[in-house]
Amino acid sequence: MTPSSAASGGLTPAGAFAGTGGVLGQQSLVLNKSWAAIATTSVRDALSMIFTGAAKAIQPETYEMHAFDTWSDLSPAPDEPCVRTVSLSIRVPEVIVLTQFNGMPHAHATFSRRNLFRRDHNTCQYCGKRPGTSELTIDHVMPRSRGGGSSWENCVLACVPCNRRKANKTPSEAHMHLLKPAVEPTWTPIMEVPIARVRQSWKHFVSDRYWDVALQP
Ligand SMILES: [Zn+2]
């Protein structure tokens, strides 16, 4: 396995990783150079970054950093999931640290139906009722017919009666008030990871991040 053969495949030794099942598609935690959790990525991309030197693997038991050669020298435990190549069994790099990048990317929460329900806590933003998801609609604060776009700043959850009452009016025209301003949530990428998918080895790095996340006012 050489860097040139890896580069030709696009991703690292990916060409050599045939038949490794779902392991490559699982998630690795990405830390910046200061060991702050900034993202998750696929195990495939994590291995690629380790292979090219853009990142190092962190050994969860010791927090030692490994370049690709010393990482691939570590023997996986018999029952441990691993990435198999023709000649190697490589431990899954569950946590990697970037060798250059030391910033904190601004995390944009995806504007999606699911995330809108999450931001508004399944609550009508006009009357405060929680009638259940099937009874909640997405209201455009400035109606679409009057140029209002679909964005974090112009969409809120509204129950069916409130949506009907507001109809094609602005909140002030309808004499209705938002319970809180419609803004983009401040979730970080790590917060997008379902809790069931957070690996045990991430806990040390994710916990501070978790508590630092700003709560909605
Ligand atoms: Zn309502």
Image (cartoon, rainbow, N blue to C red):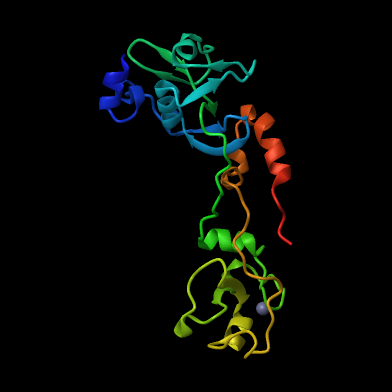
Residue 180 visible in rendering = yes
Compared with residue 70, is residue 185 higher up or lower down, i.e. above or below? below
Asked where in the image residue 211 lies, by quadrant, the reply is top right
**Residue at horizontal 38 percent and vertical 24 percent from the top:** 20
| Residue sitting nearer the eye, 93 or 181 | 181
Compared with residue 110, is residue 88 higher up or lower down, i.e. above or below? above
Compared with residue 126, is residue 88 higher up or lower down, i.e. above or below? above
- Answer with left or right where residue 18 lies relative to residue 121: left
Q: Position of residue 49 (x, y in %)?
A: 43, 27
Q: Quadrant of ligand 1?
A: bottom right
Residue 24 visible in rendering = no
Q: Position of residue 119 (x, y in %)?
A: 63, 61
Q: Quadrant of the C terminus?
A: bottom right
Could you tell me how many numbered marks the image carries? 0
Q: Position of residue 113 (x, y in %)?
A: 52, 63
| Residue sitting nearer the eye, 100 or 169 | 100
- Answer with left or right where residue 116 lies relative to residue 43: right
| Residue sitting nearer the eye, 78 or 199 | 199
**Residue at horizontal 50 percent and vertical 60 percent from the top:** 112
Q: Position of residue 111 (x, y in %)?
A: 51, 60
Asked where in the image residue 197 lies, by quadrant, the reply is top right
**Residue at horizontal 45 percent and vertical 13 percent from the top:** 72
Q: Quadrant of the N terminus?
A: top left
